[in-house]
Amino acid sequence: MNKQSVNISSLVILLSLICFIMEVCIYYFVPQRYVVIVFAIACSVCLSHFFLESSLNYDYNFIHASFMVITSLAFGIIIYIIQPNQWIKYDYSIIVLILLNWLIPFLYCCLRDLFDRGPRFDGFTLFFHRMSKFFIVIYALAILKQYFVTPFVPPYDAPSFGAHLFVPFMATAEHIEYIIRTGQSLAPVMVYIIEIICFGVPAGYFARIYLRNRHFIVRLFVCLLFPFVLELLQQVTGLGRCAIDDYVIFLIGVVIGNTLYHIMNGLFVSVATRDLTTDRGHQQKNLQF
C-alpha cells in the first residue's frame, strides 16, 4: 500500500467518522426521526460520490460503508442495552440507519457501474462481493438476535392442535377478522408480517446470486430449507414460536428478493450488456440471466 492510498483511507475514515457523529447528534437532539434518515441518505450519497470520483475505484466506498455500518451497529447495540433510558430512546430508526449506511453506497456504486461507459472506474465486481459478504455477516447476526435472542412471536395466542397449525394464514386470517370485528388496530400484525418479509428478502436475493450456477432445483431446495431450519430450531430450543405462517411469510420475502435480483440483473444485461456479477472483460456469450 503506497502513501497516497494510506492518505485516502485515512480521509475516508475521518469523513465517515464525522458523518457518524453528526448522525448521532441529530438522533439525540432532534425528535423527528425522518430528519436523521434524510441526513444519512444525503450524506452517504455525497461521500460515495466524492470517494469514487477522487480514487476512480470502488474500494474506498466499501471502507466507508463498512465503517458506517459497524459504528452505527455498535451505537444501536449500546442504546438497546441501556434501555430504559430517559435521555435517549431506542426505536426502529436505528435499524433504518444501519441499513441505509450499507444500502446507499451499494446502490450508488451499482448505478455508477451500470452507466459507466469507460470503464472509468475499477473494481466493481470485487466491491459487489465484498459488500454482499459483509451484509451476509450482519444479516446472520440479525437472524440470531431476532429468532433466538429476542424472538418475535405472532401477535395472537398459539392455536390448539388442528388445521390452524398446518394451513397457511388460517390462524393469522382469523386474528385479523377478530381485530376488524372488535375495532382494534391492525398495526401490530402488519408490522409482524412486514418484519418477517424483510428478513426473507436478503435470503432470496443472495441465494440467487451465490447459487446462480446451480440447478434451479438446488436453489429452490435451499430457499425452502433455510426458513424451515429456522422454524425447526425455534421449536427445538423453545425460543420463539414455530408457525406455518412465519414460514410462508418468509418465503414471500424470498420471492421478492429473487425478483429484485432479476430486475437488477435485467438492467445490467440491457444497459451494460453483461451480467450483474460478471467482470467487464467477459464476453456477451457468458451472460447469465
Image: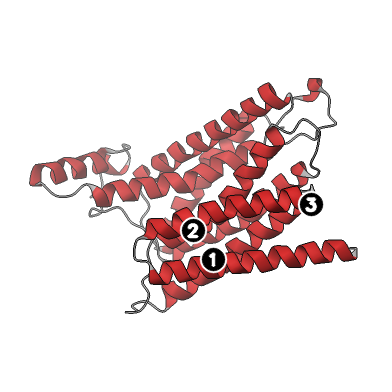
> Which marked residue is nearer to the observer: mark 1 or mark 3?
3
Q: Nearer the viewer, residue 4 or 216?
A: 4
Residue 127 appears left or right of 73: right
Is residue 233 visible in the rendered image? The answer is no
Q: Nearer the viewer, residue 22 or 148?
A: 22
How far across and down, in percent of the image, does residue 1 sit? 89, 63
How far across and down, in percent of the image, does residue 244 sit? 36, 43
Tell me how far mark 1 sits from mark 2, CA to CA: 7 Å
At x 58%, y 54%, the residue is 44
Marks 1/2 in contact by CB < 8 Å: the verdict is yes
At x 52%, y 59%, the residue is 98
Marks 1/3 in contact by CB < 8 Å: the verdict is no
At x 79%, y 21%, the residue is 284
Q: Secondary structure at mark 2?
A: helix
User: Type of residue at label 2?
Assistant: Leu
Marks 3/2 in contact by CB < 8 Å: the verdict is no
Mark 3 = which residue? 55
The mark that comes first in sequence, 3 or 2, is: 3
Q: Which mark is residue 72?
A: 1
Query: In this rendering, is residue 20 above or below 172?
Result: below
How far across and down, in percent of the image, does residue 69 sit? 58, 61
At x 57%, y 33%, the residue is 220
Mark 2 = which residue? 97
> From this viewpoint, which residue is outermost toward the right?
2
Q: Residues within 10 Å of mark 1 (few under 14, many from 20)?
A: many
The mark that comes first in sequence, 1 or 2, is: 1
Q: Secondary structure at mark 3?
A: helix
Q: Quadrant of residue 248?
A: top left
Number of callouts: 3
> Which marked residue is nearer to the observer: mark 3 or mark 2?
3
